[in-house]
Image (cartoon, helix red, strand yellow):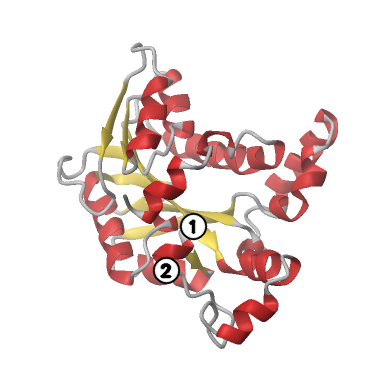
Amino acid sequence: MSLLEEYYNSRDEDTRLLSQHGQVEYLTTMKYIRECISRFSRPCILEVGAGTGRYSVALAREGYPVTAVELVPHNLEILKSKLDGSEPITAVQGNALDLSAFPDKSFDLTMLLGPMYHLYTQEDKLQAMSEAVRVTKPGGYILVAYCMNEPTIIQYVFLGGHLKEVTETNAMLTDDWHCKSEPKEIFELVRTEDIAQLNVGFPLDRIKLVATDGAAHYFREFIDQMDPDTFAKWMEYHFATCERQDLIGASNHTLDILKVRG
């Protein structure tokens, strides 16, 4: 069993986006998904790394044809358990690095909302991007989610009290405070310039780079205790600022919204 499978087998991933602070990321991602699919009369959607189906199942229940690909069997089982058979969804096990089961130019929207969290080499990241581009129609959209470097430095290294540990061993950080991610750390952490570099060479135009949770993880307990009216105002503030490029790197998660040229 891989480290990734061990991690998700022991984690209730399905509830991560259900907390009030987790809803910030979910509502933001859904907002931009809807913006993309609104361009098509009946969009055909692919989600690669669908996890337990938080997005795929929600979209299928709204009547959109969805293909959900998930690497971890445990997550795929949970996804399938949510279905009653009426949803226009196909859920299969698969890998972001090999989408050969799907023909070229098959989908209007391709979502990689998890794979880049767990790909550690530039070669693998480029392969995942290449496959996503291949299966997406010209004029279609690709949405790619990333975990960002700076929140880990602030929250884990400093607020979490791990400064001495990571600086003495020098195993986790580069000289410019970029985390050295490896499979044992589970998550790959990037900066905005790393994301931009991945897009070079592909027939893609960036539409937006969005901070999907913004400051939510810094104040998660406070946000979870907000009453509905205050939380609605927080979301209003968040939506007003989540596209500000001066704030992107401080968000725990970002969403790169790309359009395939054609």
- Residue nearest the viewer, comparing 24 with 172: 172
Which comes sooner in the sequence, label 2 or label 1?
1
Q: Position of residue 137 (x, y in %)?
A: 25, 43
Quick one: SS at disc 2?
loop
**Residue 45 placed where, x, y %?**
34, 34
Is residue 76 toward the left or the right of residue 92 in the image? Answer: right
Query: Which residue corresponds to mark 2?
Result: 182
Q: Horizontal placement of 236 versus 3: left or right?
A: right
Q: Is residue 155 above or below residue 23?
A: below
Residue 232 in the image, given as x and y percentages of width and height? 77, 34
Mark 1: give few (<14), some (14-19) or many (20+) Cα within 10 Å. Answer: many
Q: Is residue 69 left or right of residue 238?
A: left
- Which quadrant of the view contains residue 8? top left
For residue 112, above or below residue 175: above
Position of residue 116 relative to residue 92, above or below, is below
Q: Report the residue at 41% width, 48% height from top.
A: 6
Q: Which numbered disc covers residue 103?
A: none
Which residue is tagged 1?
Answer: 146
Q: Which of 229/81 is in front?
A: 81
Measure how far apart labels 2 and 1 are at the Cα level.
Answer: 15 Å
Residue 40 percent coordinates (x, y): 37, 31
Residue found at x 27% / y 38%: 107
Q: Quadrant of residue 23?
A: top right
Amino acid at pointer 1: Tyr
38 or 53: nearer the eye?
53
Label 1 SS: strand
Does 172 sit left or right of 134 as displayed? right
Residue at 21%, 46% (x, y): give it. Answer: 99
Residue 262 seen from this side = no
Residue 93 placement: quadrant: top left
